[in-house]
Image (spheres, rainbow, N blue to C red):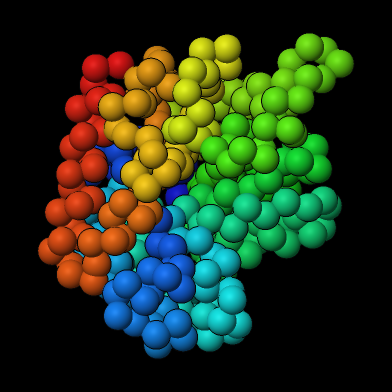
Amino acid sequence: MTVLEPFGARLRRAMDERGPLCVGIDPHASLLSEWGLNDDVAGLERFSRTVVEAMADRVAVLKPQSAFFERFGSRGVAVLEKSVEEARAAGALVVMDAKRGDIGSTMAAYAESFLRKDSPLFSDALTVSPYLGYGSLSPAVALARESGTGLFVLALTSNPEGGEVQHAIRADGRTVGATMLAHLAAENVGEEPLGSFGAVVGATLGDLSSYELDINGPLLAPGIGAQGATPADLPRVFGAAARNVVPNVSRGVLRHGPDVVALRDAASRFAEEVRAAVSRA
């Protein structure tokens, strides 16, 4: 199996060269309608192809949400495969937003689906859920190291329901979310210029100074744009770790479609605003 340069190093370079931004590929039925497309495979394909054409040669990261493709069955997954292939060929890093989580051989199979080099859905990184215990992610961690890919582990998510699990206090006095961050920091020890094992941390969560966010790995931050957070919020929320934040914007950019130029302009504005905000952190 061909081993890539570690994901963290590739991500650091892409953010430095293209700007620190991740644009989601989220073909909601409502968004397809706004674009004048039908909620069917043809609409899905047109939407995805347009986003890839507009973004893949200029943004650091594209993040397809697999559920919006899976809902169309095998034909939708085929569109997802093509989108991933074309996005990576154009130079974007692809983070597959599948939030997989299981144990043993099942977790290994999930990892192989997205992180094995010869898989049709091979991506540069995968979002995963650790809430069967961080150790349940071991097969994905091992394959990511072997293949030069990365993981983004759900740690402090922006949805209100997440707090009942992530802010729960363990017997040792730490929250569950803090425990996940500590595990990731351990995975990234000694990695330069950036580790490959990141956390998902919502940009809408406000003051997170009680958490150690400097895990020497990337922080995928949903919530910029339509969910209410702005690039200017990043230094306040993430502090010294702001330089390693990968802000995720979906509707804030995608609502400007299907015009390719308008999509590019929107992504460029967000990237520059983030770069300016992070430089002040």
Tell me what residue is drawn at x 86 percent, y 16 percent.
Answer: 171
Direction from residue 191 to residue 45 in the image, left or right: left
Up the image or down, 16 lies above or below 79; here it is above
Q: How many marks?
A: 0
Tell me what residue is drawn at x 42 percent, y 44 percent.
Answer: 227
Residue 14 appears at what percent x and percent y? 30, 43
Direction from residue 99 to residue 195 in the image, left or right: left
Confirm whether residue 219 shows in the render.
Answer: no
Question: Which residue occupies the foreground of this view, 24 or 101?
Answer: 24
Q: Quadrant of the C terminus?
A: top left
Direction from residue 154 to residue 236 in the image, left or right: left
The picture quadrant where one finds residue 57 is bottom left
Tell me what residue is drawn at x 78 percent, y 20 percent.
Answer: 169
Residue 55 appears at what percent x and percent y? 25, 60
Confirm whether residue 221 shows in the render.
Answer: yes
Up the image or down, 272 lies above or below 191; here it is below
Question: Which residue occupies the foreground of this view, 153 or 25?
Answer: 25
Q: Quadrant of the N terminus?
A: bottom right
The picture quadrant where one finds residue 34 is bottom left
Direction from residue 264 to residue 198 in the image, left or right: right
Residue 203 appears at what percent x and percent y? 44, 33
Residue 84 appears at what percent x and percent y? 42, 67
Tell me what residue is drawn at x 54 percent, y 38 percent.
Answer: 158
